[in-house]
Amino acid sequence: MLLLECPWCGGRNASEFAYAGEPMPRPDPESAGPAEWRGYLYLRANRCGWTRERWYHRAGCRRFFEIERNTQTHELRPVGGGAGGPDE
Amino acid sequence: MSEPMPMPMSMRLPAQPGEVIDREERFSFSWNGRSYPAYSGDTIASALAANGVRIFSRSFKYHRPRGLLTASHLDPGCTIQVGEEPNVRGAHRLASPGLDVRSQNTWPSLRYDVKSVNRLAGRFLSAGFYYKTFIKPRRLWPAYEKVLQRFVHGGVIPDRPEEHDAEARFYDKRYAHPDVLVAGGGPAGMAAACAAAEAGARVLLVEEEHRPGGHLRWGDAADLTLLAELRERVSAAGVEVMCDAVVLGRYDDNWVAVVERSPAGPAFERLVKARAETLVVAAGQIERPYVFAGNDLPGVMLSTAVRRLVNLYAVRPGERAVVLTANGSGDAAAADLSRVGVDVAAVVDARHGEDVVRADGRGGVRWVELGDGRRVDCDLLVTATGWTATTALLNMAGNRPVYRPEAARFVPDLDTLPDTVVATGGVVGDGTREALCEHGTAVGEEAARRAAGAAEQSGEVPSRAWPGVKGAEGARAPSAPHPKRPDAEGLTPEPHPELIHGRTHGFVDLCEDVTSKDLLSAVEEGYDSAELAKRYTTATMGPTQGKLEILNVVGILAEATGRTIQEVGTTTWRPPYAPVTLGALAGRRLEPVRHSPMQRWHEEHGAVPLVAGAWIRPDHYGDPGAEAANVRENVGIIDVTPIGKLDLQGPDVAKLLNLLYVNKWSKLEVGRVRYGVMCAEDGVVLDDGVTGRLGEDHYLMSTTSSGAAAVWEWVELWLQTEHPDWRVHVTPVTTAYASINVAGPKSRELMERVTTGVDLSPDAFPYMRVRRGSIAGVDDCVIWRIGFTGELSYEIHVPSAYGLHVWASLLAHGEDLGVAPFGIEAQRILRLEKGHLIVGQDTDGITQGYSADLDWAIKLDKPDFVGRPELAWQRQRGDHPRLVGLLPLDADTVPPEGCQLVEGAEIVGRITSSRRSPTLGRAICLGQVAAHLAEPGTEVTVRLPDGRLTGARVAEQLASVDPEGARLRV
């Protein structure tokens, strides 16, 4: 089981978290056409290698945070811009 | 004719220096109905062997007699039934007084097994026979299944195991957080555990056998001296030792699963889930069998089996032995046998090209043919032809083993391992007992260093000092891992001749009854890769999973396909390393349930429970029709505590509500409540409920009972990821309040009797308003006037500790009004009469807002809300299914929920809700219908589950009772 680094609580078992997928920027609902909107709804890069992921610490602090995970090696690293932990 | 009874313990030797049996403690147990004596410390197999028993089972396909091969947990010929427990490893499980032990899958007896005719039919049971036989004709499959079932090679489980001692005993689970977990308690593993613990690490040592020590246990006097020292050190260093326990797998980030097979206490078995900073793999080596004709006969044993029997259990493995040896273990076995007086008729030295051609005999070895043509009579043939490094856990950490032809085994490529996994002992290489301990010590110290470094890096609060970690003061251990692997030096695999098979064909996989000939025919048929041949022949797919036979399989395939062993490659060992019971994986039955503070009252008053998610709540109290009628005529109260409740506070709550609900919220005044529907971004209906504004910046949101958790998460998602600047604080209060709906024409009168501080008159407290006041003396209750049932009603939320008190007060004060409780079923009848939809019942995972008759609620003129674009497009297309009221033409037939609506062969909708309405005395329904059938008055065809067709008419509106809402607004 993966050990996920919650920016608020530290390393915890992945079973404490809910996977919330690749973060997708929300298109402008006023101007988005069906193709753009459905891309936001359904299309994910699903990259082999480093991906950016959103997780929810459901059985912990209940914060959503983002983290980068290598889908080949399961290495984890903080998102470049910072994941919004308590120090920020 | 009965099996001759040998003299009790006729094969027991005089006391041996390393024996693990306690001769002071003698008892008896039964084997196939006959009583046998044993000593404490005996395994079932060693006790039987001491009494001269040689046959323990019949083989998988051919029902050949099988005896001891490894005399360890792995032994393929020694799987037995113990009481009600099937598939027990008889060469591992300890004997105990009164055990009822039986052989498995034999009839009428182990000695005269009828199914051994399979041996004659062997040519029909060749490689891939599962795939070739029993295929056609298809209609005979049930018959084939019955035939095959009789051949299933397993024990018997009791019909109803839960009736037995399930109350007193269970499968347990435990979590562990060791700094260092050592898998394997041989000399290297023990030394590593000591070194790590002496450096300050918390160490867990897992050993599959009943005592740690590995091969030292059956060694010479010096081995036994070292063993005693190591055991003392392990205990002094404070290492937690788990014996009769095995590491099943290593997963991401050193998540390690361990099963304890005989934990202290009442548990049958215990699954330990450990997160180890550093994993030390000290799993040792497994001796390989040799392939030749007759290699499965009782009396053919590995050298380690002989050494275990003689030295641990003081059992004479035979009377006259031939020893085929290619290494020190074989030489030592020959020496052991001579020492205890077994006649060693021949020592065949494979290092000098000598060989064994075949063994033969009925029911056991009687003679052996040697490579030089000599025929030697004997009842024991010992083989020592090589080793397999137990790399399973290393494979699971990403390692791919490399074949070393000069040592005739696969060895781990240590450089490919992560820093958190290190190896020591026989899995790495060979060495003297001193070299093994030295290597283990170095690896153990480094494992502790790495664990300390990882703990410091992750900012873990130091719970203890690390006195022994070199270069570290207290908790400040160096955080950078050692640049060089500590396990790469000191132990190398010794040269060993590559011995896989002799001149004749024999069994490769003794669990699955696969021969070398089967492998060759698989190759001939085109299954020439290890993975294909393995699946086709089922070699390595039995209980030992290749631990004994993998190199033999690979070697024979390599030879048959003209490749090298490295080219064929070994198969990947995946978890679990060892067979594990389903009970251990399932663990203890712990299913928490939720219930309201009034549940005890419900139970005492005949409530029939309804399980709804984690909640247990009353479905009805005997007569749901009467309960519903009482709500229409008098007043009823229902426990609706599971309704989800979120307390929302802050200046931006209205913005949040406007975003998440499809309708408008900016103008909701303090003191009002409003019904709202949430859709997801794809426009699909997600949840609904009412939300009330309690104060300027204070709202109470209700959700469906089943959606409470998901809506909370949904609210947090939007607040945290899209609008972190909004000032809203969310507190779930579902269980902080007990919720009661008081419904019916007399509900106001009843409420007036118990409420203080709230004017309940229709003008002061109209429909869709919220007030706060005191009920039955309980302050801080929230009262909202809403009407899911279609009647005048008040939903009250009271601090949950007072829930039962308020419930009882309502009943006490309303006796003359005819107050009675009602359950979920009555509520469902009432809401269906009123045409109120239930999300998840009248909608499903693809029902968008306009398909749920929510046109009136969806406000597309709001600039933005979740799901708005999809809803706008849905409305534009206009071709969506509609939710409508349906009145069956036959008023007495209630079409079950889920019935299809059909137009010829086409499905054009479905019944989503249906009941008999007690108010109208007829069947009423809600249903989703295709757009062209949605006009009121349209007749649709309903297909009943039995295939009959019946008609229904689309109603004017969803509500069948009081569509104008007059009863609600009184």
Image: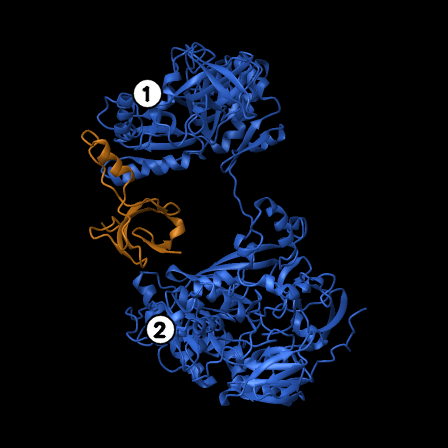
Query: The residue marked by circle 1 belongs to what chain?
Result: B
Q: Residue at x 37, y 61 (%)?
A: B253
x, y (%) of residue A49?
27, 55
According to the rendering, which colour does chain B have? Answer: blue
Q: Quadrant of residue B457?
A: bottom left
Q: Residues within 10 Å of mark 1 (few under 14, many from 20)?
A: some
The residue at the point 62 percent across, 60 percent down is B153
Q: In this orientation, which residue lies closer to the viewer: B76 or B438?
A: B76
Residue B221 drawn above or below residue B176: below
Nearest to the observer: residue B583 or residue B195:
B583
SS category of the residue bearing label 1: loop
Write down the chain letter for disc 2: B
Instruction: Indicate the position of residue B179 as horizontal and vertical percent values.
Output: 40, 66
Say which of marks 2 and 1 sits in front: 2
Instruction: Judge the density around disc 2: few (<14), some (14-19), many (≥20) Cα neighbours within 10 Å.
Output: some
Label 2 is placed on what type of residue?
Leu
- Earlier in the chain: of badge 2 and badge 1, it is 2
B572 relative position to B362: left or right: left
Residue B414: give its label: 2
Can you say whether B589 is above or below B958 in the image? below
Number of numbered markers: 2
Residue, disc 1 = B857
Q: Which chain is orange?
A: A
Residue type, numbered disc 1? Ala
